[in-house]
Image (tube, rainbow, N blue to C red):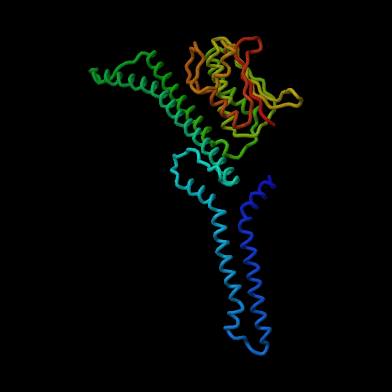
Amino acid sequence: MQLLVRKRLAALLLPMSVPVLGLVAAAAWLGYSVAAQFERHPAQSPALGEVLVAVLPALLMLVVLAVMAHLAARKALAPWVSLAQEVQSRTAKDLSPIEIAADAPSEVQVMAQALNHLFARASAESDAQQRFIADAAHQLRTPLAALQSQVEAWALMAQAAPAKSILLPQEQVERLRRASRRTTQLANQLLVLSRVDSGLGQGMAAQRVDIKSLCEALFESFLDAAIAKNLDLGLEASAAHVSGQEWLLREMISNILDNAIKYTPQGGQVTLRCGRREVEGGGSRVYVEIEDNGPGVPLGEYARLTQRFYRVAGSMADGSGLGLAIVEEIAQVHGAQLGFGAGSDGRGLCVLLLFKE
């Protein structure tokens, strides 16, 4: 790499070397000419005309070489100036590739290719953001419209009632509560996904996170939901630490655990495990595993589980299809490996996270 940089610098400075060396020689000759005139007239100052005649060739050489150096520098830097003007003249939304002339210097071509690669990445991220906004708007429109229509209907009924009030059946109130909770959860998931996409988690300083304490806290927070469904929620935790963002790791594990409890039927089992385990090739790595004995997922669907807004066909539980997409994004931020498999008895789903050392 250093050799390549030196070659490129040499290619850039070579056209200027001749006039620069000429300038140095002319300056030396000018100094010698002036010193020679003073040496020829040690007792008195030499006449101005004699000095001018002596130094005139050197002065002319300096002027000519200065012009040559200026022209050589302009010629050597012209491709770079052209590239800078091309980038500067673009609008913020213009991410089209820069056209590279075939006769452009190799170092300029390398720089243009690097800029084109950057533009391509920025364009892909911009397209992904636009798709995300469109998907988010589409997903939020349905539950918000349902909530609004229901509330509007009740408002009209209350206005038409003699006492300006109505009594609502418990079933309708429960339906409204579920819809509002689903909308709130979807909004929160979209917010988390947006923050991860924007690199907010990567821009923060990494922390030493106690995975055992984090899993114990999440176990307690999901215990009521598991009891409400008569689920056997278990915890097998041993000491382990990873480097990362605690709020992101909490969100990641929480999404997996929420899915397991949501999709496991009444009377089922969900187990949260964490610690260190042996891996192939020797050594051990920190892991988090959530296993359930619910309906599971067909083997061919594993690759699609982390797609945004994707839901397995036939799923009866409420969901937005964003939980595992968030899990994958956060896992990538922390360099963790995400894997899916069947439960220990061949039933249900087992989600495994292996963290890098």
Identify which residue is drawn at 49% across, 32% down.
194
Q: Quadrant of residue 329?
A: top right
Identify which residue is drawn at 47% across, 34% down.
126
The answer to which of 228 and 314 lies nearer the viewer is 314
Q: Position of residue 246 (x, y in %)?
A: 59, 33
The answer to which of 276 and 195 lies nearer the viewer is 195
Q: Quadrant of residue 300?
A: top right
Question: Residue 15 vs residue 133: left or right?
Answer: right
Q: Quadrant of residue 211?
A: top right
The N terminus lies in quadrant: top right
The answer to which of 280 and 243 lies nearer the viewer is 280
Residue most toward the bottom?
Answer: 43
Question: Residue 195 vs residue 37: left or right?
Answer: left
In the picture shown, does residue 27 fall above or below 290? below
In the picture shown, does residue 91 fall above or below 161? below
Q: Position of residue 22 (x, y in %)?
A: 63, 65
Identify which residue is drawn at 57% across, 65% down.
66
Numbered circles on residues, count: 0
Q: Position of residue 127 (x, y in %)?
A: 47, 31
Identify which residue is drawn at 67% across, 49% down.
7
The answer to which of 130 and 229 lies nearer the viewer is 130
Q: Position of residue 50 (x, y in %)?
A: 60, 83
